[in-house]
Amino acid sequence: KIEESSQVHFRDLVIHQAPEFMVLPSGNRGPVRFENVDMVVPVGTKERLVSWRDVFHVKNNRYGPIWEDCEFDGWAMQDDLFNLTANWGFVDTINSDHPMIIVNFTGNEGDPWGTGDWLTAEQLNGNTKGSARVAYSVASGGKYYIELDREIPGLAVGDRLYDEETSNRGAVIRRCRTYAGDAGTATWRQRTPVLIEDNYFQDFYLWINGEWDAEGPVPEDITIRRNTFKGSGRFIDTGYDSGQRATRNIMFLDNLFDHPSVGLHLAYDVLFACNN
């Protein structure tokens, strides 16, 4: 785990085995950088598993991690290669006399709901009710008691809250490579802002959508440019086919698609430009 840290740099590492999640950056306040960090099955072995769960399970960072020049071997993990998310908060109660005072419950990874943070009330279909800043918050028993600096019109019990400050902004995946190993293909879930550029991706599957129960938010501000996607079948799904989940400001720019396809399911604000 890498928590509440800044300026952490991993360089020139090869990882052959991790007992559960490999790396869990959460609640960090500055960049965590992975440079030439490879996750590969040992050469000459019959091993087909490196990580039992996610390789990079990234949540609620105030500054997103940076990956450069890394290599990843197929589906050598039991779960996702990348999972970049921010926990939803669910409105539990609202003070009827003071509607700016709410009780919110959420996951315990990272350090959300800090004084001064901007919170947005949003729905999986992309609709928002408004935003406010945290004037005061205190955690108790897995819940956060929060006073907002202004009322959010129409805010109701059960609505989802998204802490804009803990959305992994600044994350970059650059000049990395995935390839199809003997174990299969890599999977990837992307829900927070990221720049993905100059990579080579072979036989993997990327979901760009929010989960209804825990892992949000509505995906937005994702730029995918100058990458090569090589393989067959569906590589990327954006939105969700139930019509319940949306996207905002997703850009595919100057990529090479060598046979894979991209699925759009009621996704909004998706731009394709200069791709081949």
Image (tube, rainbow, N blue to C red):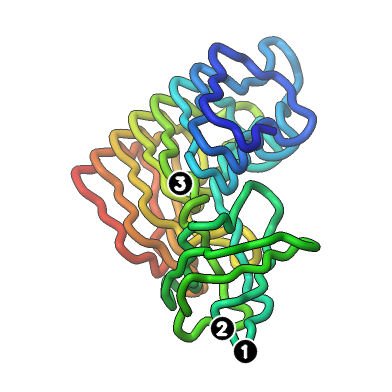
Residue at 66% of width from left, 19% of height from top? 15
- Residue 18 position, x and y percent, is 74, 27
Circles 2 and 1, Cβ within 8 Å, touching? The answer is yes
The one nearer the camera, 222 or 271, is: 222
The one nearer the camera, 260 or 129, is: 129
Q: Residue furthest bottom?
A: 97
Residue at 62% of width from left, 78% of height from top? 158
Would residue 76 be visible to someone looking at this image? Answer: yes
Amino acid bearing label 2: Pro
Q: Which type of secondary structure does the marked residue at label 3 adopt?
A: strand
Q: Is 105 left, or right, of 173 in this rendering?
A: right
Q: Is 175 left, or right, of 92 in this rendering?
A: left
Write down the quadrant of residue 9 in the picture.
top right
The residue singled out by tag 1 in the image is: 96
Looking at the image, tell me whether mark 2 or mark 3 is earlier in sequence order: 2
How far apart marks 3 and 1 lie (CA) works out to: 48 Å
The residue singled out by tag 2 in the image is: 99
- Residue 182 position, x and y percent, is 64, 27
Residue 18, relative to residue 192: is it above or below? above
Residue at 26% of width from left, 55% of height from top? 271
Q: Residues within 10 Å of mark 3 (few under 14, many from 20)?
A: many
How far apart marks 2 and 3 lie (CA) works out to: 45 Å
Looking at the image, tell me whether mark 3 or mark 1 is earlier in sequence order: 1
- Residue 72 position, x and y percent, is 56, 26
Circles 2 and 3, Cβ within 8 Å, touching? The answer is no
Would residue 179 be visible to someone looking at this image? Answer: no
Residue at 70% of width from left, 19% of height from top? 16
Residue 42, which numbered label? none
